[in-house]
Image (tube, grey):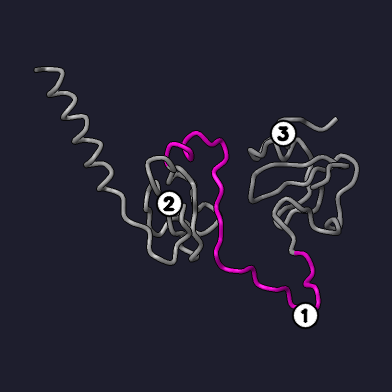
Amino acid sequence: MRISMRSMLFVAGLVGSAVCFAQAPAGAPANATGLCNDGSYTTSASKKGACSKHQGVKEWYGAASASGAAGAAGSSQAATKSTAPAPAPAASAPAAPAAKTASEPMAAAAPGGGPGQVWVNTKSKVYHCQGDRWYGKTKEGEYMTEAQASAKGFRPDHGKACK
């Protein structure tokens, strides 16, 4: 009797969990498991990361079917598919110049500096030695001796003091 009661509870739990998933709308692909915020559908087996490049999950349908869920869970690749066509590139628009990222140094070094001088990035509190890619090129900073920089509490870039 105890085994049959456990079996019944297990089956009831399975039925209850199947009811928890929302049904995909009629316009969704057959194997869609969720709708992303940008309007595309995902076929990912897991909600976590399913629409990471599509502005997040708007609605989660869960597994499309029991066999689909088992197949999707066994799959090592979770793919997202977009039903909307990609916009065509504008042929007549001129190419925009590439924007600088935070990891790119400015083009020219600040005037000044020289032997015995370090460039202190006053924002990050790091100093750069002569010949370093960031020497005189950060947005905020000033030249001073390495001894002055250390006395004011600045630290060397990547923990390497100048030679």
Crowdedness of circle 3 by 10 Å Cα count: few (<14), some, many (20+)? few
Q: Earlier in the sequence, mark 2 or mark 3?
A: 2
Above or below 140: residue 9:
above
Q: Quadrant of the N terminus?
A: top left
Image spot of residue 96 (x, y percent)? 77, 72
How far separated are the C-alphas under marks 2 and 3? 46 Å
Number of marks drawn:
3
Residue placed under numbered mark 1 in the picture: 93
User: In the rendered structure, which amino acid carries the disc numbered 2?
Assistant: Thr
User: In the rendered structure, which amino acid carries the disc numbered 1?
Assistant: Ala
Pick out the residue farthest to the top. Answer: 2
Pick out the residue farthest to the right. Answer: 115
- Give the residue at x 16% y 23%: 6
Q: What are the residue bounds of the magenta stretch?
A: 69-98
Q: Is residue 85 left or right of residue 146?
A: left
Image spot of residue 121 (x, y percent)? 70, 48
Image spot of residue 64 (x, y percent)? 40, 49
Q: Earlier in the sequence, mark 3 or mark 1?
A: 1
Crowdedness of circle 2 by 10 Å Cα count: few (<14), some, many (20+)? many
